[in-house]
Amino acid sequence: MTALVRYHTALLLRSQRWLAPLLLYGVFLVVGLRAGEPVLGALGYAVAGLLPVTAWVVRICLSQEPAAARGVVAAAAGRQRAHVAAILAAVGCAGAVGAVAALAVTATSDLRRVDPVAAGAAGLLATAVCVLTGAAVGTLTSRPFLHARGLSLAALVLGSLLALVTTGSPAAHTITSLVTASATPTVPLPWLPLAGAVTLTAATVTLACRATAWRE
C-alpha cells in the first residue's frame, strides 16, 4: 500500500494539477484573513476553505491515471487497493497543506485569553475533520460513481456546499463551534466531529471500493 500511495502522490506532484486547488486556497486565505484576528474565528475560516480543496484533490487523484496505466496497476495490486491508495495520497497532501495553514493562522492571530497550545490543537483537529469530510465528498463525486467531468464537478461543488452548511455534518459542526467560541477563552476540541468524519469517510471509501468491482 505504501508503494501505491507514493505512486499516486508522485503522479499528482508531477502533473502539476495540484497548482489550481493550492492557489485557490492560498487566495481564499489571503483575501479572507488578516493578521491579528481572533484565533478561533480565523481557524474556522481557514479549515472551511480546506473542505472543497480536499474534495478537488481527491477527484484529481482518482482521475489522473490514463486508462491503460490504471489497468496495469489494478492487475498488479488490485483495483480496490489502488483506489484506496489514490484517496490516501490526496488526503495526505491536503492534510499537510491544511496543517501548515492551521499552524500559520494560529501563529499570526490574536491569542489573547486563549491558550496557544489548545488553539493549535483545535486547529489541527479541525483540519483533520474538514480534510476527511472533503475526502468523502470527493470520493462520492468521482469515479466509479460519476465519470462525466461536468456532472462530477457540479456534484463536487454542491456536495462541498452541503457539507459546510448542513446540520449534522462533522465539518459544519466544527466550523460553527470555532466561530462561536471566538469571543470566549474556551477552546473547543472537536473530538466527536472527528470520530464522525472518520466514520463517514471510511463508509464512503468502502462503498467506492465495492463499486469499482462492478462499475469499472
Image (spheres, helix red, strand yellow):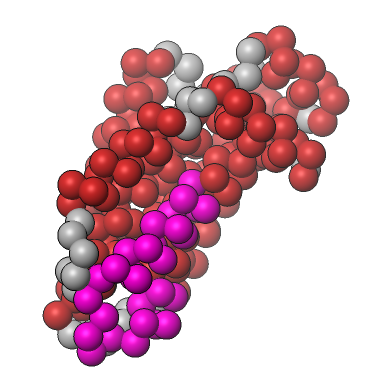
Q: Is residue 20 above or below residue 203?
A: above
Estimate the x, y position of residue 124 in percent, counting from the top left. 44, 67
Left or right: 3, with 23 as reference point: right
Q: Residue at x 23, y 89 (%)?
A: 113
Q: Residue at x 54, y 45 (%)?
A: 93
Q: Is residue 173 above or below residue 203?
A: below
Q: Is residue 53 above or below residue 40?
A: above
Estimate the x, y position of residue 91 in percent, counting from the top left. 54, 46
Q: Residue at x 29, y 33 (%)?
A: 157
Q: Which image quadrant for residue 7?
A: top right
Left or right: 192, with 8 as reference point: left
Left or right: 196, with 214 as reference point: left
Q: Is residue 74 above or below residue 116?
A: above
Q: Main secondary structure of the magenta part?
A: helix
Quadrant placement of the C terminus: top right
**Which range is magenta?**
94-121
Q: Residue at x 48, y 17 (%)?
A: 147
Closest to the observer, 67 or 101 = 101
Estimate the x, y position of residue 96 in percent, counting from the top left. 52, 53
Residue most extreme to the right: 76
Question: Is 108 colored magenta in this rendering?
Answer: yes
Estimate the x, y position of residue 202 in percent, counting from the top left. 57, 51
Closest to the observer, 212 or 116 = 116
Residue most extreme to the top: 68
Total labels: the figure holds 0
Residue most extreme to the left: 183
Quadrant placement of the N terminus: top right
Question: Is 159 colored magenta in this rendering?
Answer: no
Q: Is residue 70 visible?
A: yes
Q: Is residue 206 visible?
A: no
